[in-house]
């Protein structure tokens, strides 16, 4: 219980940091802290596999990408807000959601799962048990999520792809590109470098 | 399962051993590089230069600890700590011998059911140290080093993960100790080709993950001064060096454990001296030494990749090769065995 309270406070403070910190890098770091705290929380609930996946996927891959993009773009602190009213709408929605969550939890309090039972069921976060549930019971859902992710990936590739020259003539975009890529001292094509960004 | 105090003592001892090994790895590396480049290397401090690491340590501690004026102070101080904490904690899951072989104790700090994933997860978080350090320094060279490092690690983590998959599929477990006990090469000769490919792909990605030559673009001194290390000095710089070498040792131990039978001794010796493959620690250390030497040897031999070559190699060759090895392993398991 003491561990839970400490972890809960740390993760909530981290989550607040994401919203309140001005510097984008600090906000992203705060999110990393929250994610790591959640992973520790999973460990205390005997869900070791989930904890490691949380660290590996969110902290290790997704947040690295986030920080990479923030650093690459070197986002300046944006003082001028484009739609000032939107901030208040967001505050309102956030407040309603928070109050709803707390009220919901108070109206329908549930006993936390017993650690011993969870340990027996998960066998120390055994990946085999999770695989059985994931690949037999929820096989179809799992495959569908895979297809969904693939769709997202194809969409991202389609968005950043260069336009092909139309059959008739050369468009302005491709002409500009040709000028850019044929600068002296630079190899004419960098497919990976361009695609990697 | 050990009592908590045993685990704590073992963790503490492991940290000390790793840091001691780091100090002497710097000496060994400089001496070997010296031999390979027809010069002596450090040989003045003590016999064979054996006191050089101690002299270096004293120098690092007493050097002025500069914090750059325009740096993001909190992140600047935090970054080397993140680096070393995650570097040290990754090693704990790697088994050093069979259960109870170390004076009745288990020669590992923790025995996790998901040891493989644990090591991968902790090492992937360790990269924050590098690119936060580069960003917080508020210098263009440091930032370039950070960007290179994060792009590199994202690219090579895929190859790393995919090449581990073959081993996991064959062993049928994520527990490092059980992987060693199964002995992936003994399962079937049909699995040797995909395993060999996965092994090579894994070694290459591991070198990229620990930022060693030819993948040391984040600190390419001919191009960007020292990359993320540019603005660091004294003990903070030493912490980064420590984490680099500890990461190298973890990578070496991880490769040995996954692909080369980890803590088990050679079969021939087991026939000559029965029980020799049960000796703790020694076989793992010998196997690690081979890979540490390989890392140093590569540093003396290979030139550095250019950035676009690095990206092309990672995404167009290494990833595909690792994927092919995984598919081949799956096919062999499904149709032959």
Image (cartoon, grey):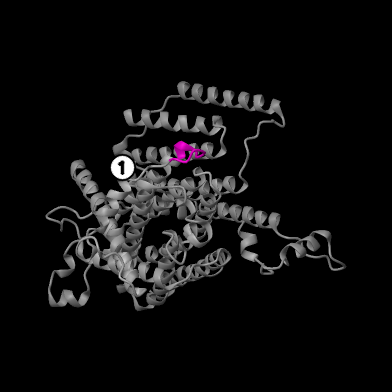
Q: Which residues are magenta?
A: B67-75
Identify the residue shown where x is 35% and y is 74%: B36
Q: Is residue A69 magenta?
A: no
Q: Position of residue B295 (x, y in %)?
A: 37, 67
Mark 1: secondary structure: helix
Of residues A138 and B116, which is closer to you in this image? B116
* Residue A7 showing in the rendered view: yes
- Please give the chain letter of the residue carrying mark 1: A
**On screen, residue A193 above or below A98:** below
Left or right, A19 with reference to B161: right
Residue B270 location, quadrant: bottom left
Of residues A23 and B324, which is closer to you in this image? A23
The residue tagged 1 is A119
Identify the residue shown where x is 31% and y is 39%: A117
Identify the residue shown where x is 58% and y is 45%: A70
Q: Position of residue A37 (x, y in %)?
A: 41, 37
**On screen, residue A154 above or below B300:** above
């Amino acid at each position: 219980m003491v561990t839970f309270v400490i972890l809960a406070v740390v993760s909530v403070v981290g989550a607040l940091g994401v919203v309140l910190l001005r510097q984008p890098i600090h906000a992203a770091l705060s999110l990393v802290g929250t994610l790591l705290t959640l992973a520790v929380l999973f460990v205390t609930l005997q869900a070791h596999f989930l904890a490691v996946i949380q660290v590996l996927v969110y902290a290790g891959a997704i947040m690295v990408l986030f920080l990479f993009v923030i650093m690459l773009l070197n986002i300046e602190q944006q003082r001028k807000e484009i739609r000032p009213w939107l901030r208040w709408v967001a505050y309102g929605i956030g407040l309603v959601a928070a109050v709803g969550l707390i009220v919901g939890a108070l109206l329908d309090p549930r006993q936390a799962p017993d650690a011993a039972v969870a340990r027996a069921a998960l066998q120390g976060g055994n990946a085999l048990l999770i695989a059985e549930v994931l690949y037999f019971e929820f096989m179809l859902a799992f495959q569908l999520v895979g297809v969904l992710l693939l769709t997202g990936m194809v969409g991202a590739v389609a968005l950043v792809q260069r336009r092909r020259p139309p059959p008739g003539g050369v468009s302005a975009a491709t002409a500009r590109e040709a000028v850019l890529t044929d600068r002296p001292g630079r190899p004419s094509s960098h497919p990976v470098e361009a695609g990697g960004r | 399962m050990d009592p908590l105090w045993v685990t704590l003592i073992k963790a503490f001892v492991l940290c000390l051993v790793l840091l001691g090994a780091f100090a002497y790895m710097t000496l060994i590396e400089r001496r070997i590089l010296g031999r390979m480049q027809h010069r002596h290397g450090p040989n003045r401090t003590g016999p064979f230069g054996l006191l050089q690491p101690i002299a270096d340590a004293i120098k690092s501690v007493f050097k002025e600890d500069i914090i750059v004026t325009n740096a993001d102070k909190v992140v600047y101080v935090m970054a080397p700590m993140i680096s070393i904490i995650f570097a040290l904690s990754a090693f704990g899951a790697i088994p050093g011998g069979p259960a109870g072989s170390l004076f009745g104790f288990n020669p590992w700090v923790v025995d996790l059911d998901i040891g493989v994933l644990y090591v991968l997860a902790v090492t992937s978080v360790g990269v924050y140290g590098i690119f936060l350090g580069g960003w917080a320094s508020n210098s263009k060279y440091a930032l370039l080093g950070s960007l290179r490092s994060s792009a590199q690690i994202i690219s090579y983590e895929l190859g790393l993960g995919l090449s581990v998959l073959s081993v996991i599929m064959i062993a049928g477990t994520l527990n490092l100790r059980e992987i060693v006990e199964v002995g992936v090469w003994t399962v079937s000769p049909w699995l040797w080709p995909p395993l060999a490919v996965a092994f090579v792909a894994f070694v290459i990605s591991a070198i990229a993950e620990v930022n060693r030559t030819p993948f040391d673009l984040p600190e390419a001194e001919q191009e960007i001064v020292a990359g993320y290390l540019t603005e660091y000095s004294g003990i903070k710089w030493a912490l980064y060096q420590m984490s680099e070498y500890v990461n190298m040792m973890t990578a070496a131990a991880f490769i040995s454990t996954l692909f080369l039978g980890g803590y088990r001794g050679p079969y021939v010796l087991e026939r000559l001296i029965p029980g020799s493959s049960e000796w703790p620690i020694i076989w793992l250390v010998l196997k690690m030494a081979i890979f540490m030497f390989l890392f140093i040897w590569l540093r003396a031999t290979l030139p550095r990749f250019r950035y676009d070559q690095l990206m092309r190699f990672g995404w167009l060759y290494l990833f595909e090769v690792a994927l092919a090895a995984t598919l081949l392993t799956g096919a062999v398991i499904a149709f032959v065995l």
